[in-house]
Image: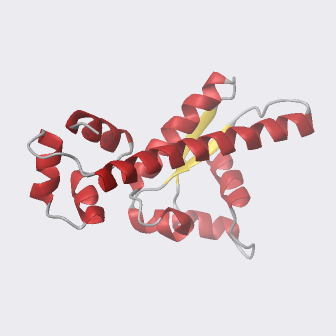
Amino acid sequence: MTSAELKTIRESLGLSLQWVADQAHVQLRTAQYWESGRNQVPADVAQMLTALDEQLWGVVAETLKQVQTLAEQSGALPEQIALIRYRNDADLWAFRPDFKPMPVGTHAALLSRVRRKLWEIGVPSVIEYMEPEIYKKWLAERQDNESLRAQWALEQS
């Protein structure tokens, strides 16, 4: 992986260079050297970022598959899909523990990819911020799940 590829993939994933350094267990300065081209990007770092990029594209593909399945069952594509954006890492990890230790910026990058692919198949989407206190009041006695979060987000738009 070239230094330019490292920076491009890192930015497309919504990752800070500090996050990459932390995951690689190196000082920020070392990661800066990789990105500047002063030092070669280690194979394990390249593999980590490539795997994460592929993982996000896998989530996009799975989301589109779910939309297509719903369309087949109902006979039509959804009129609109609501996507939820989290304001900070703590909220993201509280509602999506499967995302930890990814930062909220990576989740935003995922939303951007999903939104683009939905648009390509003719399904409009809206992105709403998760407002935990408002959502919890709306949820009342029900058990939180992704379907209820999506329903809540649609009602917010």
Classify 3 as above or below 119: below
Image-based side of 153 in relation to 31, left or right: right
How many marks are shown on the rendered structure? 0
Q: Residue sitting at 11 percent across and 48 percent down?
A: 33
Closer to the camera in the image, 146 or 54: 54
Image-based side of 135 in relation to 18, left or right: right
Closer to the camera in the image, 135 or 43: 43
Q: How is the image coloured?
A: secondary structure
Q: Residue sitting at 63 percent across and 50 percent down?
A: 153
Q: Residue sitting at 64 percent across and 40 percent down?
A: 61
Image-based side of 104 in relation to 135, left or right: left
Q: Kindly indicate the quadrant of the structure image that contains residue 6.
A: top left
Residue 150's spot in the image, x, y percent? 67, 52
Pick out the residue farthest to the bottom.
Answer: 141
Q: Quadrant of the C terminus?
A: top right
Residue 105's spot in the image, x, y percent? 38, 50
Q: Quadrant of the N terminus?
A: top left
Q: Residue sitting at 38 percent across and 58 percent down?
A: 103
Q: Kindly indicate the quadrant of the structure image that contains residue 78.
A: top right
Residue 25's spot in the image, x, y percent? 24, 67
Residue 45's spot in the image, x, y percent? 31, 53
